[in-house]
Image (spheres, helix red, strand yellow):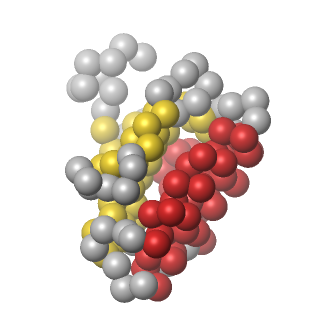
Amino acid sequence: MKSLFIESTAKTPEIIFDPERNVFDIKGKSIPDDAEHFYNDVLAWFDDYLMHPNDETVVTIDLEYFNIASSKRLLFVLYKLNELVEAKKNVRVRWCYNEDDEDMFEVGQDCAFMVNVPFDFVSYNLKEVGIAI
């Protein structure tokens, strides 16, 4: 299956979905002017992936910020992961967040509550990874 790579911009996240390397990452900011348009390719890619998924799929979501329109689209991605769970595939979400960002942690918990996909919450400290805040 073909990989999907979308380079990040100031308003959109980097998307790397590479089933051959078993990499499924969404990273950065997600505040596109038209979230539905931006996420159309992502959701279409997942529809194709569902037809021939890997035995294990771990999706890493590491967003520093996203708007309401993006949250709806991200939830649609998570709903697609539900289908893999129902197909008895090994599926997890790694929800990464800055340890000082309680809101992002809570949003991840809310997302985990809305789907049947196991979540791992991974906190990091931006100062420790060398990013000035």
Q: Nearer the viewer, residue 66 or 4?
A: 4
Residue 4 place in picture, x, y as percent: 44, 43
Residue 96 place in picture, x, y as percent: 38, 46
The vertical placement of 107 against 57, above or below, is above
Q: Please indicate whether residue 122 sits to the left or right of residue 46 in the image.
A: left
Farthest residue to the top: give it. Answer: 132
Residue 133 place in picture, x, y as percent: 42, 17
Farthest residue to the front: give it. Answer: 1
Residue 73 place in picture, x, y as percent: 66, 52
Decide if residue 31 is in sight here: yes
Decide if residue 28 is in sight here: no
The vertical placement of 1 against 55, above or below, is above
> Which residue is painted at 58% across and 30% down in the image?
12
Q: Nearer the viewer, residue 44 or 95?
A: 44
> Which residue is painted at 33% across and 60% down in the image?
58
Total numbered badges shown on the rendered structure: 0
Looking at the rendering, in which quadrant would you find the N terminus?
bottom left
> Which residue is painted at 23% across and 50% down in the image?
21
Q: Nearer the viewer, residue 31 or 19?
A: 19
The vertical placement of 6 against 123, above or below, is above
Q: Nearer the viewer, residue 48 or 21?
A: 48
Q: Please indicate whether residue 82 sits to the left or right of residue 31 in the image.
A: left
> Which residue is painted at 26% across and 18% down in the image?
130
